[in-house]
Image (cartoon, grey):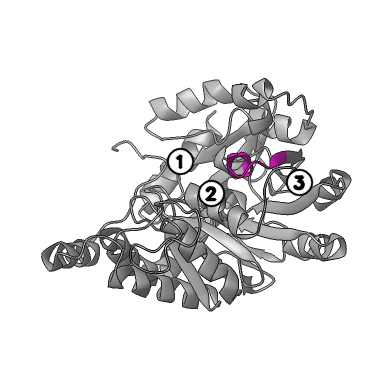
Amino acid sequence: MSFIPISRPAIGPEEQAAVAAVLASGQLAQGPQVRAFEEAFAAFVGVPHAVAVASGTAALHLALLAHGLGPGDEVITTAFSFIASANCALFVGARPVFADIEPQAFTLDPAAVEAALTPRTRAILAVHLFGHPCDLTALHALADRHGLVLIEDACQAHGAQWQGRPLGAAATACYSFYATKNMTTGEGGLITTPDAALAERLRLLRAHGSPARYRHASLGYNFRLTDIQAALGLAQLPKLPAWNAARRANAAYLTERLTGLPHVCPPSVHPAAQSVFHQYTLRLVDRDRDAAVETLRAAGIGAGVFYPLPIHQQPLYRGLGYTDRLPITENAARQVLSLPVYPGLTPAHLDHIAQAVRAL
């Protein structure tokens, strides 16, 4: 059996034709394909506005700027994520404040968020890690009670739901379309919002603060998406529900095969959540996780570790004076191991993965 990578983008004839049509048109930069992609993704989430940008990181950056976050403000988020989830606060001059996570879903613990509140807290950045939603019921209640902005980092959670509602239905949400995500535009990002005024600020911020050609009303950035990327996204979006369903089915198979093994804790899904399993991430307890990764790779399985060093322990943040102790986060970083779960896996692939983990 050939090597099974941790992820593999699905690019078919529809995507190739869509990109070729844009190349033939000569309209390569932001144009009608971007507008169509924004409208389609907004409808997919169930909100009136979507603003496409250059990356998921750009989406997070502009979301904080558009909400008025800046120097002196604190943004509570998780240290168990890709570093952009915290760096976006630094980009605007705010300070990331880290709260610990729930041990099962690896997402922000609302009680830890409440304990981290200070008079300077202005926002909660909730990261839907590995495609599993945060407890949005508790986080929305907390934000409303304290007058805070809630921003959802859904960069790994396209199509996930909480209590039957899509992520971002009631708050600003940020998405990434990097090559390894559940759907891709190669690079690219997008912000969804129910707020028309916020959407207009985002459109200005992504394009040099320009409401009209060569007129600049405010400071902005060159964070635009291209029509080439948007065409790829338009071809991928209709396939996303079926791809997510395949990920859930693959995850269910792996969980059935791995439940009850000593030292292995398969991922669990909160009853109110519908995960899209961007990663299938289990815990390996009382075993050498890194040695297990190498053993699986030697068996032809692209196991991965997301994330081995939490953000608060990164050299950047140590240099900024962060000395936080987040025991649940730190324990997870030592134990987590992700297995392939993407839609293109065959039953033979899944069986091989399960057998290899059982043999550890």
Badge number at residue 353: 1
What is the crowding at mark 3: few (fewer than 14 residues within 10 Å), some, or many (at least 20)?
some
Examine the rendered structure and indicate whether residue 320 appears above or below residue 135: above
Camera-side residue of 204 and 37? 204
For the point 37% across and 56% down, which residue is it?
184
Q: Is residue 304 magenta?
A: no
Circles 2, 1 touching at the beta carbon (< 8 Å): yes
Badge number at residue 254: 2
Q: Is residue 133 visible?
A: no
Which image quarter: residue 38? bottom left
For the point 87% across and 48% down, which residue is it?
119
Residue range in magenta is 86-96
Which comes before the other along the chain, label 3 or label 2? 3
Q: Outermost residue, left direction? A: 24
> What amino acid is found at the position of numbered circle 1 in the picture?
Ile
Q: Position of residue 313 (x, y in %)?
A: 67, 25
Camera-side residue of 197 and 291? 197
Q: CA distance from mark 2 to mark 1?
A: 8 Å
Which image quarter: residue 239? bottom left
Q: Is residue 94 magenta?
A: yes
* Secondary structure category for the residue under label 1: helix
Q: Is residue 274 left or right of residue 179?
A: right
Q: Disc 3 or disc 2, which is closer to the eye?
A: 3
